[in-house]
Image (cartoon, helix red, strand yellow):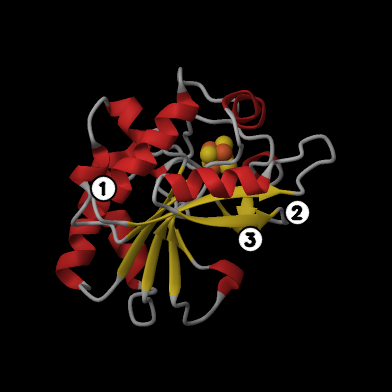
C-alpha cells in the first residue's frame, strides 16, 4: 500500500502526522523534494492517486493515539484532491475533534476551481501555510514554474481568502536552494503581512526534513 499517512523521522508516537493525498501539482518548483528523492524517511511517496477515504483512515489509525496535528502536505498539492481532503477533515472533526488541521499549499485552489475554496474549508481547516516563494511574479514563475496562468496573483488572492475565512495563515519562502536565486526575504515578509498572514523563511534542507 502507498504511503498516505506518515510521520517524519519515523517517530513512534508522533504529535504531527502528515497526509500525502496526491502526487500532482500545478507548480514544478526547482527546489521540490520530489526532484531529489522518492521517499520520506524510507517511505515511498509516489502513488497513482488510486485510493479511497477508507485507506487514509486505516493508515491514520496507526497514529491516532498520539497525533495532535494533521498536516496535508506530501508529494503534491493537497487541494487537487479537494473532495478527498474535505471528507477526511470531516472524519477528523467528527472522530478526533481536538486535532488541529493544517494544509501546506501552493495557493492555486481558488483559481483551479474558480470558486472560493477557503470558504468551503473554513470549518474544516485551522491553519494554512501558503508557498509565497518570491517577491514578484517573474521570480515566482522562474522558481515555481506554474502550470496555470496568473498563478502568482492567484496565490496571493487565495491567501487573502483564507485570512478572511478566519484561518491561521502563514506564507513561506524557501531560501538557500541554489546560488542563483536571491529571494528578497524582507519584501516577501512585507507581502505576507500586507495580506494579513504570518511569515516564515524556510532554509532549504537537502533531504527535506
Ligand atoms: S508546490 Fe510543493 S509539491 Fe508542488 S512543486 Fe512546489 S514544492 Fe513541489
In the picture of the structure, the residue carrying the numbered disc 2 is 206
> Which residue in the structure is indicated by mark 3?
42
| 152 on left or right of 181 | left
Q: Which residue is mark 1?
A: 164
| Rendered residue at 47%/82% (across/down) | 13
Q: Quadrant of the C terminus?
A: bottom right
Tell whether label 3 touches label 1 (CB within 8 Å). Answer: no
Quadrant of the rendered image containing residue 116: top left
Q: Kindly check if marks 3 and 2 are in contact, taking CB atoms under 8 A apart as contact.
A: no
Q: Could you say where residue 70 lies in the image, as x and y percent from the top left?
A: 37, 65
Is residue 61 or residue 198 the one in the foreground?
Answer: 198
- Place of residue 170 in the rendered image (x, y in percent of width and height, measured from the top left): 45, 55
> Is residue 197 shown to the viewer in this render?
yes
Residue 68 pos. (x, y %): 36, 76
- Give the alpha-carbon distance from disc 1 to disc 3, as whole Å: 39 Å
Q: Nearer the viewer, mark 3 or mark 2?
A: 2
Amino acid at each position: 500500500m502507498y504511503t498516505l499517512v506518515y510521520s517524519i523521522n519515523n517517530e513512534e508516537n508522533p504529535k504531527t502526522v502528515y497526509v500525502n493525498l496526491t502526487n500532482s501539482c500545478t507548480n514544478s518548483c526547482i527546489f521540490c523534494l520530489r526532484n531529489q528523492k522518492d521517499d520520506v524517511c524510507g517511505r515511498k511517496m509516489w502513488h497513482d492517486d488510486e485510493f479511497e477515504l477508507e485507506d487514509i483512515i486505516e493508515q491514520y489509525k496507526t497514529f491516532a493515539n498520539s497525533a495532535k496535528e494533521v498536516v496535508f502536505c506530501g508529494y503534491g498539492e493537497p487541494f487537487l484532491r479537494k473532495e478527498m481532503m474535505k471528507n477526511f477533515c470531516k472524519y477528523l472533526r467528527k472522530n478526533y475533534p481536538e486535532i488541529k488541521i493544517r494544509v501546506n499549499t501552493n495557493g492555486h485552489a481558488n483559481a483551479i476551481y474558480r470558486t472560493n475554496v477557503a470558504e468551503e474549508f473554513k470549518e474544516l481547516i485551522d491553519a494554512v501555510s501558503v508557498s509565497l516563494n518570491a517577491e514578484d511574479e517573474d521570480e515566482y514563475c522562474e522558481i515555481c514554474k506554474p502550470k496555470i496562468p496568473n498563478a502568482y496573483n492567484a496565490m496571493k488572492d487565495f491567501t487573502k481568502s483564507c485570512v478572511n475565512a478566519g484561518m491561521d495563515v502563514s506564507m513561506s519562502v524557501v531560501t538557500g536552494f541554489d546560488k542563483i536565486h536571491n529571494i528578497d526575504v524582507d519584501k516577501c515578509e512585507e507581502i505576507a503581512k500586507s495580506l494579513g498572514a504570518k511569515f516564515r523563511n524556510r532554509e532549504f534542507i537537502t533531504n527535506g526534513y
